[in-house]
Image: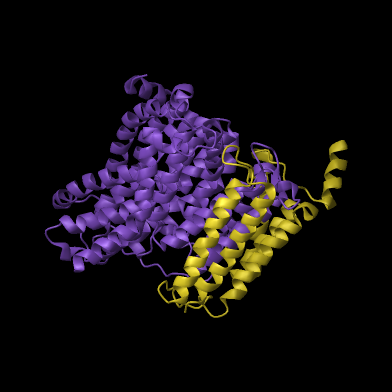
Chain colours: A yellow, B purple
Amino acid sequence: MRSYNLISSLFWFLVGLGFTLGGLHYGFGSWKEPGPGLLPVVFGTLLGLLSVMLFILSLKGIKRSEGKPFWEMKGSWRTVLSVLASLFLYMAFFKQLGFILLTFLFIFFLLRFIGKKGWVISISLALVISFFSYGLFSLLLGTPLPKGQLYGSAFRASARV
Amino acid sequence: MDPLSGLLQGFSTALTLNNLFNCFLGCFLGTLTGVLPGFGPGAAVALLLPMTLYLSPASAIIMLAGIYYGAMYGGSTTSILVNIPGEAASVVTCFDGYKMALQGRAGPALGIAAFGSFIAGTISIIGLMFVAPPLARFALEFTSTEYVSIIFFGLTLLCFLGSGSKIKAFMMAAVGILVGVVGTDPVVSKDRFTFGFDFLMDGVGLIPVVMGLFGISEVLLNLEKQEFSLFVGKIKNLFPNLEDWKASKWPIIRGTVIGFFYGILPGGNAIISSIISYGVEKRVSKHPERFGQGAIEGVAGPESANNATATSAFIPLLTLGIPTNAVMAIVLAALMIHEVVPGPLLITKNPDIFWGVIASMYVGNVILLALNLPLIGIWVRLLKIPYVYLFSSILLFCLIGAYTIGNLVSDIGVMIFFGILGFLMKKFDYEPAPLVLAYILGPLFEDNLRRSLNISGGNFTVFFTRPISLVFILLGFLVLLLPFISRISKNLLKR
């Protein structure tokens, strides 16, 4: 199956082209006084040329890529995509939900639904990990982790008292 | 400063309670990294980088170095016991180490791996101690022209030494340089490829890139794999007998020499040096047919080589400020976070860092010998932890780590982006190493290139008229042409 190399070389060709055009836009400058576009043009073009080379070699069948299926196991795409989704959600709600609650939900999800652990062990471990990591990073190391909009105000209120 | 008094001063840094702890922590985490499959030193060093913000620069490097050479010790354990390399530099150890374990000789295999690592590590530190200072003095005369040539040579060699397709390696190096271009132009302060995002103005952050490419993508890839079942028999006789020593003596020494020189080369990494050492041992052996059937030389050589490499890789970083592999690139970042500029002046300006790190390596090798031989049972038990606990903690650590660097949620996004990219690259057979290194060296390359062109008035001949620069340029082109030369010579021989 050659399609792996063909698809990826097309992708990198477009990336190279994009950087080359961008570099020309920013200004190549002269050899005497190189501008901000020098590197993007040179290496964007290089990337583009190499992609074309890879494309041609793969088309001729000289450069083979392994003919394995994209997903290693049947249905493994579901696991990978759900973990990815949980990462994106973690980022999206980082400021809103606050570190402890969010981390609890995140770890709970991974243990219960990806790792297929029991409810009790998933909940208790998620509790321990979220509080422990908050204690380690925020209290011990002084990293300002977000408390969340909900209890951020509650914390501030209690601090005032 | 002569090496001896330097070393004495170094020990006064390394033997403080604080730094002993940092060294121990680094070695401990390194061994853990080495033992756990699917989690390499690159990811570990990246994960721990945010923690070093709270340490002095010397302590930070002591810890990060410990992780790197510690991982080389730990990597052999799983190779020998379960036939799964704990990290990539121990792949070849599987060939004979696992066979030895099947024959009931797991003990001597683990033992010779640890002792070989110890001997190679220690000799390599001595080499580092004597080679680095003169090299740094020599490098003082380097101008931006020489740096351009050295980086050019380094990048070509890196692509050439890589394991997969050469075209793809060069493509990834180009991508790396282009990623490094993103951000505000250093000379005329113009935003490049930021697409209006404020967080890209300072460039794409190193930590999110490395954590994404080595941490997140590894987890995503491993999610697809079935959990391996672990079978470990009783391990006895960790001390190799006299015969084992006789067979391993020269492999250890050869492995050390090979590993040491590969570490200095740009792009030379522990994976390659261990493979080369295995090949050399097989070639010089009187009974090459024994290799793959449980030959102790096949464990002793490569395990020594990867440790020697992990130590000597510090030479180009500490003397020229040029990292030769991804781990060294992160160590470079750690130095820069603390506003220490690695380069020819480091040894004279920050002797506490240079000699402190060297002294800590002697200490670390002793710690690792203790961690790996008597405590081997603990590490083996660790392997029985289900992967879900491991990857959950890795992901959480990555998320927190990426955020703590600049308290930016956008860095988490960059990390996830590079995690997906790394995942896809692996699926499409592209290596991440050239990308990372080119991305690190890119800004350095651009800065020096533009400066030397500026000085020479746009005249490219400066790269060829200055002798040191010429040597590196020629070497670089030689590396580029090597595949063609070998093909032509093969054709000529056929006739």
> Which one is nearer the viewer's eye here, A52 or B206?
A52
Task: Give left or right: position of A131 versus B95.
Answer: right
Please give the name of the residue rendered at 52% of the width and 34% of the height, measured from the top-left corner: B452
Front residue of B162/B400: it is B162
How many badges with numbers are in the image? 0
If the image is split into quadrants, where does the N terminus of chain B sit? top left
Residue A113, percent from left and from top: 64, 71
Residue at position x 87%, y 36% from top?
Answer: A160
- Name the outermost residue toward the left: B286
**Quarter residue B11 falls in:** top left
| Res B279 quadrant in image | bottom left
Residue at the spot 84% in from the left edge and 38% down from the top edge: A159
Q: Vertically, is B334 above or below A91?
A: above
Task: Please tell me in which quadrant of the rendered image residue B420 appears.
Answer: bottom right
Q: Is residue B201 left or right of residue A63?
A: right
Q: Residue at x 40, y 34 (%)?
A: B465
Between B44 and B383, the one lying in front of the other is B44
Percent of width and height locating residue B73: 36, 49
Q: Quadrant of the C terminus of chain B?
A: bottom left
Q: Position of residue A4 (x, y in %)?
A: 51, 73
B225 or B458, which is in the foreground?
A: B458
Q: Is residue A11 left or right of residue A25?
A: left
Q: Is residue A147 above or below residue A15?
A: above
Q: Is residue B25 visible?
A: no
Residue A59 showing in the rendered view: yes
* Residue B129 pos. (x, y %): 34, 30
Q: Is residue B194 left or right of residue B238?
A: right
